[in-house]
Amino acid sequence: MSQSIAANPDRLLPADPGTRSIARSLLERVQDLPIISPHGHVDAAVIENNTPFPDPAALLVSPDHYVTRLIHASGVSFDKLRSTGPNAPESREIWRTFVEAWPLFEGTASGYWLRTQFESVFKLAADLGEMSADASYDAIAAKLVESDFRPRQLFKDFNIEVLATTDDPLDNLASHKALADDPTFNGRVLPTFRPDAYLNIAHPEWAAKVERLTETAGDGASGYAGYIAGLENRRRYFVEHGAVSADHGVPTPATLKLDAAEAESLFEKARAGKATAADRDAFEAHMMYQMARMSVEDGLVMTIHPGSFRNHHQPTFEAFGADTGHDIPFAVNYTEAIRPLLQDFGTDKNLHLVLFTLDETVFSRELAPLAGFYPSVYLGAPWWFLDAPDAMLRFRSAVTETTGFSRSSGFIDDTRAFCSIPARHDASRRIEASFLARLVAEHRVTEDRAHELIVDVVDSSPRRVFKL
C-alpha cells in the first residue's frame, strides 16, 4: 500500500460507486466537526506543561501495546521494543525493529491508524515501507522538535473540543485546574473518576489505597462507613473539577446489592487478608451497585469496561509489567449480571450508564435489547480489539435495528497515543458515513434524514450521553 492510498479521500468508504457517492456527502457533513473525546488516557500534565513529545520510538512504538503485541507474536522479544528500563535499546534500534516488522500490520486497525498519522500528522514523504528505517526516523524526529509540534498546538490543530483523562480518586487534579484557569487554553480537559484499585480487593495495593482514602476523605469515620464516605467525597471533588463520568474497568459486569452489615463484614475480612475469591467477587459486585447509587446522586455518567483477562502471560507480566499486550478478551454475561443494578436505578432519569464489551456476541443478544428498554442504558462504542473498521460496521449492523441511532455513546478513542486521536475519530466518521450510505442506497433512510443522523451520532450523542 502506498502513501497515496493512505491519503485517499475515499478510504474506508463503500466500494460501490453509487453508495460511495452518498457516503462522501455524509462524511463531508461531519468531517470538520470538533472532536469530542469523553474517554481516554492522555496525561493532563502533558497538555498543561506543553511537554515536547519524545523520540519516534518512545512516542509511537514502545508504549503502544497494539503495536508491540503483534511484533512480539512474530518472535521478537519485548527487550527489543521497550524504550525504558535497564539495557533498553537505543531508540533508533527500536525503530528499525518496528520498520522491519511493518508488513505485519497490513489489514490491521493499527496499520491504518499509523498510516494516517504518518500522512496527516508527520507528513512523511512516502509510505513507511518505501522509506528506510533511518530516513523515516529522522523525518519524524525532525517534526518532533518543531516549536509548533507541541501538545497545546496539536490540541488546536486536531480540532479537539473536549478531552477526558483517566484519574486516580486521590489525584489532586492540579493539571486540570491549571488548564481550566488558563485563559490561553481554549479546550476542555476533563478528569474521569477511575476507582478500580479501590473496589477490587484482589488488587495488591487495595488495603493501602483504602487506608489513604479513608484518612484523606472519610469524614473521620472508620471502617466501611469511612470508605464509602471517602469515595463519595472524592467523587464530589472530581465533579467540582469538571468531571462528567466515572469509569470502571472490571473483570465482569456483575452487580450485587448487599445490606450494610454484609458489606461491612466483607470489607473487614478483606482488610484482615482473609477474603476468599468468592468474597472478592461479591464485594466488587456490591461496589459496582454502590457506584451506580452514587452516580444517581452526583450525576457522574457511569461507564463499565468489562471482559478482559488482564496479564494473561505471567512471565511477561513479571518481566515487563502490565499493559504490555497480553490482556485477552473473554465472554461476558450482561443480562443477569447487570440486573440488580437496573432493578433499582435502570429507570432513574439521573443515571446514564454506558456499557462496553469486548465480546461482540452480546451486542445484538444483550446490550441492544437492554439499551432499547432502560432509559439509563447507552451502548458503548466498539472498544479495544473492536475499535477497527470492520468491527465498527458489525456493531452498527448488530444494534441499529433494535435501538436505532439514539442509544449509543458516540465514538470513544480510548487511547494514550495523543497523535492517533484524529486518525481514530476520522476512521469512525467514515464508518458511520458508510453504514448510513448503505441504508440510503437501500431506501431504508432518506438522504436528508441520514445527514441529520450522522451529525447526531458524531457530535450530539457524546454530548448528550456524557452530559457535556
Image (spheres, helix red, strand yellow):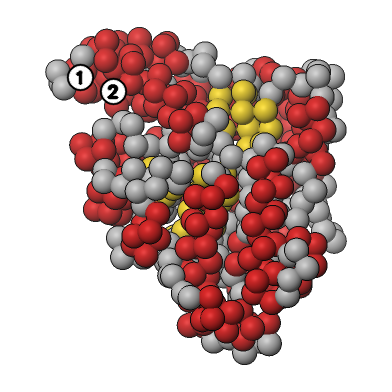
Quarter of the view holding residue 205: bottom right
Counting every numbered tag in the picture gives: 2
Task: From the top left corner, tell me how far across and down residue 369 is, in percent.
Answer: 25, 48
Q: Residue at x 38, y 59 (%)?
A: 344
Q: Residue at x 62, y 23 (%)?
A: 161
Looking at the image, the residue that sits furthest to the bottom is 274
As drawn, 356 above or below 254: above
The residue at which mark 1 appears reads as: 445
Labelled pair 2, 1 in contact (Cβ < 8 Å): yes
Quarter of the view holding residue 389: top left
Q: Disc 2 and disc 1: Cα gap in Å?
A: 8 Å
Task: From the top left corner, tell me how far across and down residue 104 is, in percent.
Answer: 51, 44
Indicate the amino acid at tag 1.
Val
Which numbered marker is on residue 436? Answer: 2
Indicate the amino acid at tag 2.
Leu
**Which of the two residues, 453 or 265, is positioned nearer the viewer here?**
265
As drawn, 45 above or below 422: below
**Which of the two residues, 26 or 333, is positioned nearer the viewer here?**
333
**Which of the two residues, 303 or 412, is positioned nearer the viewer here?**
303
